[in-house]
């Protein structure tokens, strides 16, 4: 299972690019805000352009919020929480994560696989 760690110094941050004929399934997200300057308010987003065959001649890019994560300054947590069953987080386009206030001290690691 691949994973990618990036700092949240810019927003949005692209973690994984869209897969052709596949979706991205997020297995885990680790938010390490131990060096952060403030609380991290994150949103996992799915960014894609619908097909023209969907009845729209000139489709426009769409961004859908899939998950919100709040991590206190100095904290480090993993999604999904241990012992709590959750539905799979599926991304059909680009996997983006936004942060309310960009902070290079906040590090996010995303583990994922393609289906």
Image (cartoon, rainbow, N blue to C red):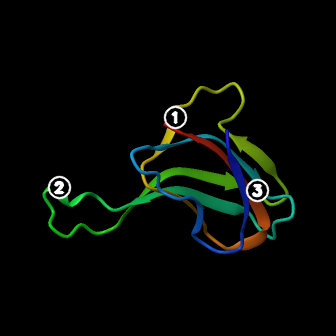
Q: Earlier in the sequence, mark 2 or mark 1?
A: 2
Q: Tell me the number on the disc at residue 37.
A: none
Q: From the image, which quarter does the N terminus lie in?
A: top right
Residue at 56 percent across and 31 percent down: it is 86
Q: CA distance from mark 2 to mark 3?
A: 44 Å
Q: Are marks 3 and 1 in contact (CB under 8 Å)?
A: no
Q: Nearer the viewer, residue 111 or 44?
A: 111
In the picture of the structure, the residue carrying the numbered disc 1 is 88
Residues packed near mark 3 inside 10 Å, few (<14), some (14 to 19) or many (20 plus):
some
In the picture of the structure, the residue carrying the numbered disc 2 is 53
In the image, is 57 to the left or to the right of 71?
left
Where 23 sits versus 104, above or below? above
In the image, is 50 to the left or to the right of 66?
left
Q: Which image quadrant is residue 12 in?
A: bottom right
Residue at 43 percent across and 43 percent down: it is 22
**Residue 56 x, y percent position in the rendering:** 15, 63
Q: Earlier in the sequence, mark 3 or mark 1?
A: 3
Q: CA distance from mark 3 to mark 1?
A: 24 Å
Please tell me whether mark 1 sits on a helix, a strand or a loop.
loop
Where 22 sits versus 47, above or below? above
**Residue 24 x, y percent position in the rendering:** 51, 45
Q: CA distance from mark 2 to mark 1?
A: 27 Å
Residue at 43 percent across and 55 percent down: it is 93
Please tell me whether mark 3 sits on a helix, a strand or a loop.
loop
Residue at 41 percent across and 51 percent down: it is 20
Q: Tell me the number on the disc at residue 72.
A: 3
**Residue 14 x, y percent position in the rendering:** 58, 64
């Amino acid at each position: 299972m691949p994973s990618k760690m990036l700092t949240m110094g810019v927003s949005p941050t692209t973690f994984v690019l869209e897969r052709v004929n596949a979706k991205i399934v997020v297995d885990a997200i680790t938010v390490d805000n131990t060096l952060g300057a403030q609380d991290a308010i994150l949103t996992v987003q799915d960014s894609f352009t619908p097909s023209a065959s969907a009845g729209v001649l000139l489709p426009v890019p769409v961004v859908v919020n899939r998950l919100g994560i709040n991590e206190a300054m100095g904290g480090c947590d993993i999604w999904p929480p241990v012992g709590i069953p959750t539905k799979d987080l599926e991304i059909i386009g680009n996997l983006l994560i936004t942060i309310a206030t960009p902070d290079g001290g906040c590090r996010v690691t995303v583990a994922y696989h393609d289906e």
